[in-house]
């Protein structure tokens, strides 16, 4: 099935490594054409409640179906778009597509909540980004609770006034703000007392650490205890195996996202899933 490898698909496009490298280095130059040619897609990765067996939402993740390179994953173009400020154009497009999808699902009688990623460069580009989100949900007649906004831990790490203000403004409108990749940086614990987010996404570094998984388990268990006492919502990402999922349940973490359940998928696949029973998922 349509899961991407980090190398993209250029082998099948019959261009050589040199040409592929040249095209990748000019990814920004090709971006506006790509938008016009409808090459930017939004894929959805379901988030589950492992205890109840339901799909509780999804994260919107962008993909680029490049005319010559084939499918590209965010790691291949987002850093470059961030350097040039084009990330804001990408993100506005992604958010617009997501809101359009949510609107369509609402019309069909399915109230769904979707998480979107916000880059700290977006906030530099538009200092009043909360207003942008407010206009979006008005335009598509969706509730603020239907859009969760993920901001990566590292963005908060350098004490960014504007980011803190933006977080508060988004929350005032009614959006939930989640700190993404929690635990991947070095100042995580201190941030828990300072950052006014609603939820925490636990980075998959803890689960990936198979060599010291027994020690990792102790760390995760106590982090969750802390998150509960501090009244944060939380979800674990990067859940790849049944062992991961069963462990998380055993320490009272029931919200999960990861390849064990679902990989990111095109909207046509996502919207026909059985949201009430993850055991009916296609394999
Ligand atoms: P993220 O926000 O932390 O998103 C989760 C990433 O983990 C996704 O990678 C997802 O495919 C991957 N993932 C999910 N489950 C598993 C698992 O079980 N195992 C492993 N190894 N990986 C898993 P993806 O789609 O390649 O995106 C990478 C990053 O690019 C995202 O990390 C996010 O920071 C950024 N990104 C993706 N889409 C957007 C976007 O539309 N806008 C912005 N600003 N950033 C985006
Ligand atoms: Mg994210
Ligand atoms: Mg993450
Ligand atoms: Mg991550």
Image (cartoon, helix red, strand yellow):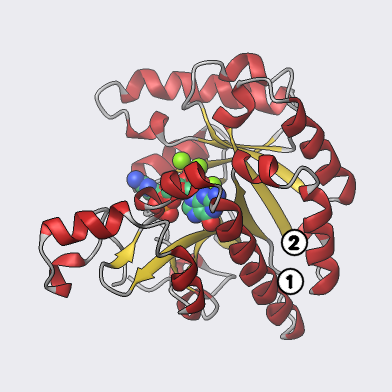
Left or right placement of residue 65 versus residue 211 in this view: right
Looking at the rendered structure, the number of numbered marks drawn on it comes to: 2
The residue sitting at 49% across, 67% down in the picture is 32
Q: Nearer the viewer, mark 1 or mark 2?
A: 2
Q: In this view, does 150 lie above or below 247?
A: below
Q: Residue at x 80, y 49 (%)?
A: 130
Q: Residue furthest bottom?
A: 108
Look at the numbered disc 2 and give the secondary structure of its residue: helix
Q: Quadrant of residue 198?
A: top right
User: Mark 2 and mark 1 in contact (Cβ < 8 Å)?
Assistant: yes
Can you tell me whether the CB of the residue at mark 2 lies under 8 Å from the nearest atom of ligand 2? no
User: Can you give x and y, in whole percent of width and height, for residue 191 in the image?
Assistant: 66, 19
For the N terminus, the quadrant is: bottom left
Q: What residue sits 62% from the left and 71% below the top?
A: 97
Give the residue displayed 41% in from the left and 29% down from the top. Answer: 206
**Circle 1 sits on which residue?**
111
Which of disc 2 and disc 1 is earlier in sequence? Answer: 1
Q: Mark 2 points at which residue?
A: 146
Is residue 240 something that shows in the picture? Answer: no
| Element carrying mark 1 | loop
Image coordinates for residue 201, horizontal then vertical, percent: 57, 38
């Amino acid at each position: 099935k349509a899961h991407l490898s980090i190398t993209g698909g250029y082998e099948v496009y019959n261009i050589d490594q040199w040409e592929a490298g040249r095209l990748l280095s000019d990814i920004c130059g090709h971006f506006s054409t790509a938008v016009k040619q409808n090459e930017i897609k939004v894929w959805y990765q379901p988030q589950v409640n492992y205890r109840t067996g339901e799909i509780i939402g999804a994260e919107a993740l962008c993909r680029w179906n490049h005319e010559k390179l084939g499918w590209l994953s965010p790691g291949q173009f987002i850093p470059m778009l961030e350097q040039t400020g084009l990330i804001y154009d990408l993100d506005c497009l992604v958010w617009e597509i997501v809101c359009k999808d949510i609107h369509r699902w609402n019309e069909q009688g399915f109230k769904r909540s979707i998480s979107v990623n916000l880059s700290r460069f977006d906030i530099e580009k538009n200092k009043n980004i909360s207003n942008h989100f407010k206009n979006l949900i008005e335009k598509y007649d969706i509730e603020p609770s239907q859009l969760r906004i993920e901001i990566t831990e590292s963005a908060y790490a350098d004490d960014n006034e504007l980011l803190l203000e933006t977080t508060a403004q988004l929350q005032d409108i009614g959006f939930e703000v989640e700190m993404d990749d929690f635990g991947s940086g070095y100042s995580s614990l201190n941030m828990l007392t300072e950052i006014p987010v609603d939820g925490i996404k636990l980075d998959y570094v803890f689960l990936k650490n198979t060599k010291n998984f027994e020690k990792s388990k102790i760390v995760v268990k106590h982090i969750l205890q802390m998150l509960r006492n501090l009244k944060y919502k939380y979800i674990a990402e990067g859940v790849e195996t049944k062992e991961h999922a069963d462990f998380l349940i055993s320490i009272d973490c029931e919200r999960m996202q990861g390849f064990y359940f679902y990989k990111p998928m095109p909207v046509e696949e996502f919207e026909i899933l059985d949201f009430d029973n993850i055991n009916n998922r296609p394999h």
